Image: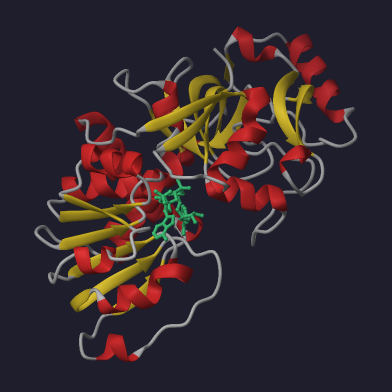
Amino acid sequence: MVSQSVVFILCCAVLCCPVWSSPFLRPTKMLRSSMAAVMRAVVVREFGGVKKMKVETDMPAPSVGDHEVLIKVHASGINPVDTYIREGMYASLPELPYVPGKDGAGVVEALGAKVTKFKLGDRVFCSINGRYGTLASLTSAPETRVFPLGENLSFEDGASIGIPYFTACRALILKAKAKKGERLLVHGASGGVGLAAVQMGRELGLHVVGTAGTDEGISLVKATGAHEVFNHRDPKYLKNLGTEKFDIILEMLANVNLDKDLTLMNPRGRTIVVGSRGPTQINPRNLMMSESSVTGVALGTSTEEEWAELAAHVVAGTESGWVKPPVHKVYSLEEASQAHHDIIHSKGAQGNLVVRVTE
Ligand code: NAP
């Protein structure tokens, strides 16, 4: 248990910092290693390109509220949304300066007074919002966004679960209401969300067809469980898909594919738009005879009840073994900006990109 004087020093260190002025609330329980008032972190002081990401060694550690968990971060998962936020091109932006990174995995270092789900030393993964992200040796998270990480998964695996699996789950279960035996097209299956959707689709008993843009991506999507995989860069791939249509389409690049998707749906088919990087034109007539629909998905709009439902599916998947994130590349903290560059300028996705934060 930390002494009063250490807590006093921690509070002073944080309160005296003019930029990071959030009070360091005293958690009820702490591990010795979390007593540092400062931490190593990637810090963004101005929105913009990857050069705005700087490793700093004296960032004040985040506060730990009553319902929060302080996590010693071992690995941080990189998602496209991290780059939109860093560029300042996202609907909800953190106050500057901030530490990027929504997904992460590590060990519980301290607990708020009202946390009941965890104990010190637990292995966990998290998916969070806010100024104190996971590209730092410490992050704090509401206990509702922290989940147990079994010994069967590494910290790199754990850091790759959050956004990809929760999004796939929200799209397939909450939005598409997938039913056993239905045909699923994962249009863009080689990235984080796509591979999670392939695994979840198989778990739900769907016939899973995926697309990828490279031979390596195609092999990975097949190895991950898709029944069939096609190359979305092949001009003939729509023909190659065959004549059987789809009940559900998960669309990763709607600005390129939405109009095609409308022609690929069975009666009462559902296209779920997960990703889009611009506007597009569609022919709405293609929705009429099939009475098919297009729905957007936004993980960030999930209610507390929905988070709990998504977490129940995903955590059960980590326990039973179908959640197996394919980690493509691991970067050091100093290379975090390279990871941000690589996820957006990918020549062909092959699973998740992860930053190793602490050993
Ligand atoms: P990622 O790991 O970077 O993967 C991108 C995927 O898009 C790859 O499979 C890529 O395939 C594929 N792609 C590229 N060109 C394509 C094309 N012409 N047709 C179909 N697919 C194509 O990204 P991610 O994490 O999977 O996320 C995918 C998208 O969803 C991103 O735009 C992301 O911002 C968005 N997203 C939205 C939510 C939400 O709540 N709505 C949540 C998470 C992610 P190849 O590289 O093999 O060509």
Q: Is residue 73 above or below residue 240?
A: above
Q: Going 51% across and 56% down the picture, which residue do you hit? A: 300
Residue 277 x %, y %: 54, 64
Q: Quadrant of the N terminus?
A: top right
Residue 165 x %, y %: 36, 45
Q: Going 84% across and 21% down the picture, which residue do you hit? A: 13
Residue 103 in view: yes
Residue 353 x %, y %: 49, 34
Front residue (pair 310, 28): 310
Left or right of 203: which side holds 108? right
Front residue (pair 177, 307): 177
Front residue (pair 81, 32): 81
Q: Quadrant of residue 252?
A: bottom left
Q: Going 88% across and 29% down the picture, which residue do you hit? A: 17
Q: Quadrant of residue 163?
A: top left
Left or right of 91: which side holds 60? right
Q: Quadrant of the C terminus?
A: top right
Left or right of 158: which side holds 177? left
Front residue (pair 13, 134): 134
